Image (cartoon, coloured by chain):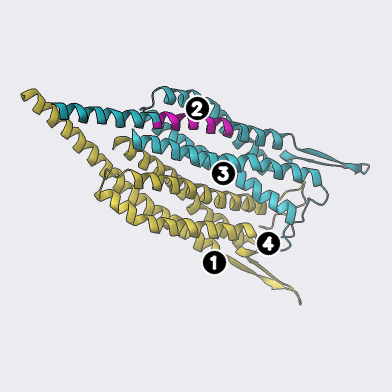
Chain colours: A cyan, B yellow
Amino acid sequence: MKDEVVVIEENSKAAMQRRGMNKGASIMDLIFRCVAIIGTLGSAISMGTTNETLPFFTQFIRFKAQYDDLPTFTFFVVANSVVCAYLVLSIPLSIVHIIRSSARYTRLVLILLDAAMLALLTAGASAAAAIVYLAHKGNARANWFAICQQFNSFCEHTSGSLIGSFASIIVFILLIFLSASALARS
Amino acid sequence: MKDEVVVIEENSKAAMQRRGMNKGASIMDLIFRCVAIIGTLGSAISMGTTNETLPFFTQFIRFKAQYDDLPTFTFFVVANSVVCAYLVLSIPLSIVHIIRSSARYTRLVLILLDAAMLALLTAGASAAAAIVYLAHKGNARANWFAICQQFNSFCEHTSGSLIGSFASIIVFILLIFLSASALARS
């Protein structure tokens, strides 16, 4: 009888410990989501406000570069906005996981949606990166010229706005891992 | 005493059922991995063998297009090859999961690596898609001309090789979900 009590106590101790670790993982999850919100929102705003008018112009043409001159940059802004909106909507669920740290099926749903959003965010960021690379270096074989020599500030702005997006990609991979590790412990 | 036996029987029935579902998920996992291997390998080979020489040439220049004229396509081939190699290496672990369907920590490792590979594959595929789009449509504002009018077969080949890569992205999202659902049940 005494042995049984000891076993039950040890079991409940282990369960308490697991629950504590899951609570910690859930709090990390919430913090990571906030970081990713800042990253994607910053990227979307930074790219969306990119706009350069060159100081010289002819009678008919004004040299102006805007992010939506290139469809890929428009896709980048849309992808970052969608992911940012998703992250904001997922915050309540993340808070629920802190309170009910043994939740399973809601975590599973989050993992699926996180993976889909990871793919969307990566698609936007890397397509934009391919175009930014082309704008910087050009391509002699395809006769595509580097436009960064003229539109210097435009190029700097677009390159900089990729940073938040790529940081958020890493955060998403960590988010998926955190949710999965909580599932493995529960 | 009889009640206890019934409870234990029901518990073991539920456990058996869960184990059966996990075995099914592991078999699906193995099949999906094989599909993704075919997809990424096909994409890498298809892009890597793209090569077009135009039937006309001048005294000095021969018009030739190869995949490695564009660094983005080289990245696409490398990304697809790396992901394909990873998938082949993960097959033994996938088979272990069919036999030991309650494994937890190896599944966790697979989820982390799968998420990282999903990001790498998406980056390669979407960067290549951005360049293919540019090759088809060009961009008047940046003075980049559509090269597909001259290099028709080159463009068709590169566009086609994206399909396997994008299909593999969807397979990877399903793989992550399958592993996570097996963790939720175990």
CA–CA distance in space, label 1 to label 4: 19 Å
**What percent of the width, then of the height, locates residue A54?**
87, 42
Name the amino acid, label 2. Answer: Ser
From this view, report whether residue B149 is shown above or below residue A102: below
Q: Which residue is under mark 2?
A: A90
Name the amino acid, label 1. Answer: Thr
Question: Is label 4 in contact with label 2 (beta carbons under 8 Å)?
Answer: no
CA–CA distance in space, label 1 to label 3: 26 Å
What chain does badge 3 belong to? A
Q: Which residue is under mark 1?
A: B49
Sequence-wise, the earlier of marks 1 and 4 is: 1
- Is residue B16 rendered magenta in the image? no
**2 and 1 marks on the same chain:** no
**What percent of the width, then of the height, locates residue B182?**
32, 40
CA–CA distance in space, label 4 to label 2: 48 Å
Which residue appears at 44% of the width and 37% of the height? A178
Question: Is label 1 in contact with label 3 (beta carbons under 8 Å)?
Answer: no
Sequence-wise, the earlier of marks 3 and 2 is: 2
- In this view of the protein, which residue sits in the foreground, B108 or B71? B108
Q: How many marks?
A: 4
Question: Is label 4 in contact with label 3 (beta carbons under 8 Å)?
Answer: no
Which residue appears at 59% of the width and 37% of the height? A79
Name the front one of labels 4 and 3.
3
Q: Residues within 10 Å of mark 1 (few under 14, many from 20)?
A: few
- In this view of the protein, which residue sits in the foreground, A139 or A113? A113
CA–CA distance in space, label 4 to label 3: 31 Å
Q: Residues within 10 Å of mark 2 (few under 14, many from 20)?
A: some
Q: Which residue is under mark 3?
A: A122
Q: Which residue is under mark 4?
A: B150
